[in-house]
Image (tube, rainbow, N blue to C red):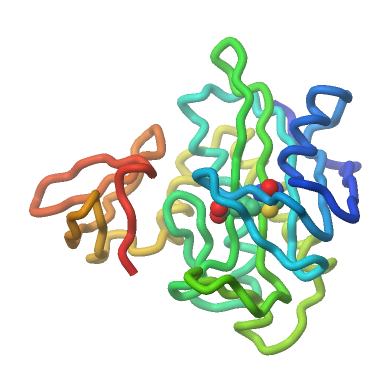
Amino acid sequence: MNYKRLNPAIIHLETVDSTNNYAANLLKTSKITNGTVIVTKGQTAGKGQRGNSWESEDEKNIILSIILFPEIQPKDSFYLTIAASLAVHKTISLHLNNVKIKWPNDILVGQKKIAGILIENQIKSSLITSSIIGIGINVNQENFNSGIQATSFKSELNQDFNLENLLNELYLNLDFYINLLMENNFKILLARYYENLYKFKVPAKFEIGAEQFTGLIQGVDATGKLIVRRDQISANYDLKEIKFVF
Ligand code: BTN
């Protein structure tokens, strides 16, 4: 696929239920260009991973979805996760230290979550025909629901951050990493993902069901499952099977 956002189409919304839902409707009803972005000041029903909601105070954070027509095979879909994670990671680490990607695509500062990504793919005849990449970054919000280990630019730096500048940096980084993907630079993407992966090849605590253990992340397999070595034996886990213990 040829991905060059020379004239990026950016749709600005005051408020919306979810930018991912808006993007999905747009895909059904309009002819849109590759790389179209939907950005909003607030969501009334923001969606997170695993059916969770994504809470974000109005006008304080980055909330957007980007629509791609990647035409890659579903077996390579984890590279969309990798490209998006790297773009968000890069944008944040230009300003903050100790930024890591927690498998598969949470962005942490230290052990606190600063950004989340929700990717929804449409598949037809064994190709990913379109992909909606939803990104939420905590920027100027300081209070989070109890029970969530979250942080933001403002919590880390004690000052307000310019949302517009950060958005522009994010667009550039998305373009860069999506181009790497579209040019099939899978090896480079995976190497960069590992460089920035939380607890990569260092002892980390995990939970499977009621059992906790210490293991070493060896990498991810071709389908995006996490490969964890425990007592000299490696096994591959999907998101429903394994959890980090903080
Ligand atoms: C997660 O970590 O649970 C994923 C959060 C993804 C949130 C973003 S905000 C923009 C886009 N629209 C949504 O409804 N969700 C994503």
Does residue 25 appear in this view? yes
Relative side of 14 to 243, left or right: right
Residue lying at the far left of the rendered structure:
231
Residue lying at the far top of the rendered structure:
125
Residue 164, quarter of picture = bottom right
Image vertical order of residue 237 relative to residue 142, above or below: above
Instruction: Pinpoint residue 163: horizontal percent, then vertical percent.
Output: 80, 69
Does residue 176 appear in this view? no
Residue appearing at x 69%, y 51% in the figure: 46
Residue appearing at x 53%, y 22% in the figure: 73
Relative side of 168 to 197, left or right: right
Judging depth in this view, the residue of 18 and 73 nearest the camera is 18
Residue appearing at x 77%, y 78% in the figure: 161
Relative side of 231 to 159, left or right: left
Which corner quadrant holds the C terminus?
A: bottom left
Q: How many marks?
A: 0
Instruction: Pinpoint residue 71: horizontal percent, then vertical percent.
Output: 64, 23
Judging depth in this view, the residue of 34 and 18 nearest the camera is 18
Which corner quadrant holds the N terminus?
A: top right
Relative side of 132 to 50, left or right: right
Instruction: Pinpoint residue 197: horizontal percent, then vertical percent.
Output: 42, 59
Residue appearing at x 67%, y 57% in the figure: 136
Image vertical order of residue 195 relative to residue 23, above or below: below
Instruction: Pinpoint residue 121: horizontal percent, then vertical percent.
Output: 61, 30
